Image (cartoon, rainbow, N blue to C red):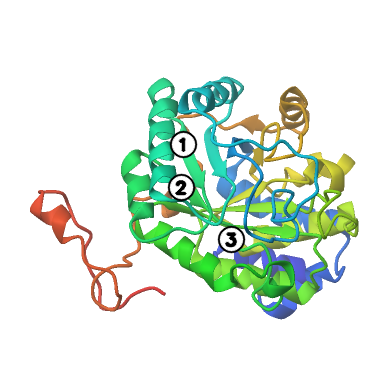
């Protein structure tokens, strides 16, 4: 008789979604932990081999955010003793990026606190992208600025940004429990704007905020519907001075099962081991590399991470290699040679008529539209 883990593995290799019951069983403890890892690791190896992609975060503007996200040390009313500063210069950002690239980082994530960017903020980021790519033209630049307005995603894409990151963080059902100043739908809207502008969508979650197994599964289905190219998996860093400062409910076992579940849901997607891995996975970090194919190198937004040299040693000791700048991260089927149409008939978005007038190739249109 076929076991649950065999079923999940075979479905993932066919890029099929787990059922709700299958997902709940993984989180509920069915299967020994090493058996769960072995099953999900088979999927990871099929699509990503033994490569680990390195990413780095540059916090362009820290603290003083008007939003009230309960998990965030930069939130409105936070008493966390973090660094607070206004925008750093493009030159300083490029200097930080250069050091990370020389250490092996393939993607640089430019992040700024706030509800969303104004036009001057977009200009700052445009200048920063130019500075970063002027020194390292092949580096991927991901941008994370909060909620996007009309035309802003297009400006970022035109400036050379590769991706836009905006996590859903938790399920729609309980989103109001962690934030009251914007909604789950606001976040979905920003991801759709970024995707329609041609930016690679990056969206994931934060676990350890009191969510149930049902919340985790609901979130996985919601993310799957958005079809992101990368999914960061964060574990709550419980900062003193924030509403969730006292939450230490995660165990390494729980974290590994969540990572395995997300590999089953996102078999051919960059699953990124992100914030909180050091304090919640602890000695199981190397095991997690058999599930995630991407990590953040070094520090996070407002907390320090594991030293970069230790990360590189952990990768090597675990039998993995750092993904090279000239190696594609995603499998061929997900590369932009095949672009899902989200414009024209069946959608509210105009066709790429201007591109045709300029003599650029336009994708063929079909009879329907993806949501």
In the picture, measured across the screen, residue 1 lies left or right of residue 249, that is left
In the picture, measured across the screen, residue 267 lies left or right of residue 358, that is right
Which residue is pictured at 53% across the width and 39% down the height?
Answer: 110
According to the picture, the residue beneath numbered tag 3 turns out to be 13
Q: Secondary structure at mark 1?
A: strand
Residue 178 to residue 35: above or below: below
Distance (Cα) linking label 1 and label 3: 27 Å
- Alpha-carbon neighbours of circle 1 within 10 Å: few (<14), some, or many (≥20)? many
The mark that comes first in sequence, 2 or 3, is: 3
- Alpha-carbon neighbours of circle 2 within 10 Å: few (<14), some, or many (≥20)? many
User: Is any atom of residue 161 visible in this view?
Assistant: yes
Q: Secondary structure at mark 3?
A: helix
Which residue is pictured at 44% across the width and 32% down the height?
Answer: 128
According to the picture, the residue beneath numbered tag 1 turns out to be 140
Residue in the foreground of this view, choosing between 80 and 309: 80
Residue in the foreground of this view, choosing between 368 and 79: 79
Which residue is pictured at 73% across the width and 67% down the height?
Answer: 178
Image position, residue 222 (x, y; %): 58, 71
Number of labels in the image equals: 3
Image position, residue 140 (x, y; %): 46, 36
In the picture, measured across the screen, residue 168 lies left or right of residue 174, that is left
Residue in the foreground of this view, choosing between 339 and 166: 166
Residue 144 to residue 9: above or below: above
According to the picture, the residue beneath numbered tag 2 turns out to be 163
- Where residue 255 is drawn, which disc sits there? none
User: Is any atom of residue 17 visible in this view?
Assistant: no
Distance (Cα) linking label 2 and label 3: 26 Å
Image position, residue 276 (x, y; %): 78, 46
Q: Report if the CB atoms under discs 1 and 2 are less than 8 Å apart.
A: yes
Q: Quadrant of residue 170?
A: bottom right
């Amino acid at each position: 008789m076929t076991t649950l883990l065999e079923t999940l593995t075979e479905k993932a290799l066919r890029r099929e979604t787990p059922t709700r019951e299958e997902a709940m069983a993984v989180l509920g403890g069915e299967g020994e932990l090493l058996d769960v890892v072995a099953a999900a690791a088979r999927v990871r190896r099929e699509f990503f081999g033994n490569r680990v992609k390195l990413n780095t975060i540059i916090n362009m503007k820290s603290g003083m955010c008007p939003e009230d996200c309960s998990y965030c040390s930069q939130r409105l009313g936070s008493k966390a003793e973090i660094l607070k500063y206004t925008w750093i210069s493009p030159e300083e950002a490029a200097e930080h990026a250069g050091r990370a690239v020389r250490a092996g980082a393939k993607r640089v994530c430019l992040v700024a606190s706030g509800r969303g960017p104004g036009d001057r903020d977009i200009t700052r980021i445009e200048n920063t992208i130019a500075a970063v790519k002027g020194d390292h033209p092949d580096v991927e630049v991901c941008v994370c600025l909060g909620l996007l307005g009309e035309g802003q995603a297009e400006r970022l894409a035109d400036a050379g940004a590769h991706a836009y990151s905006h996590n859903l963080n938790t399920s729609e059902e309980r989103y109001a429990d962690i934030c009251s100043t914007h909604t789950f739908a606001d976040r979905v809207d920003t991801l759709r704007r970024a995707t329609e502008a041609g930016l690679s969508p990056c969206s994931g979650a934060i676990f350890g905020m009191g969510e149930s197994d049902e919340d985790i599964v609901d979130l996985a289905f919601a993310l799957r519907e958005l079809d992101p190219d990368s999914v960061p998996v964060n574990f709550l860093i419980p900062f003193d001075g924030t509403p969730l400062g006292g939450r230490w409910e995660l165990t390494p076992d729980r974290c590994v099962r969540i990572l395995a579940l997300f590999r089953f849901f996102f078999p051919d997607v960059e699953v990124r081991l992100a914030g909180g891995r050091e304090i919640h996975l602890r000695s199981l970090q190397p095991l997690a590399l058999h599930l995630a194919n991407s990590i953040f190198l070094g520090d996070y937004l407002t907390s320090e991470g594991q030293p970069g040299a230790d990360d590189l040693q952990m990768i090597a000791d675990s039998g993995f290699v750092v993904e090279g700048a000239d190696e594609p991260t995603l499998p061929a089927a997900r590369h932009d040679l095949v672009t899902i149409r989200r414009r024209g008939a069946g959608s509210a978005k105009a066709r790429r008529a201007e591109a045709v007038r300029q003599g650029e190739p336009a994708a063929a249109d079909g009879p329907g539209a993806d949501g």
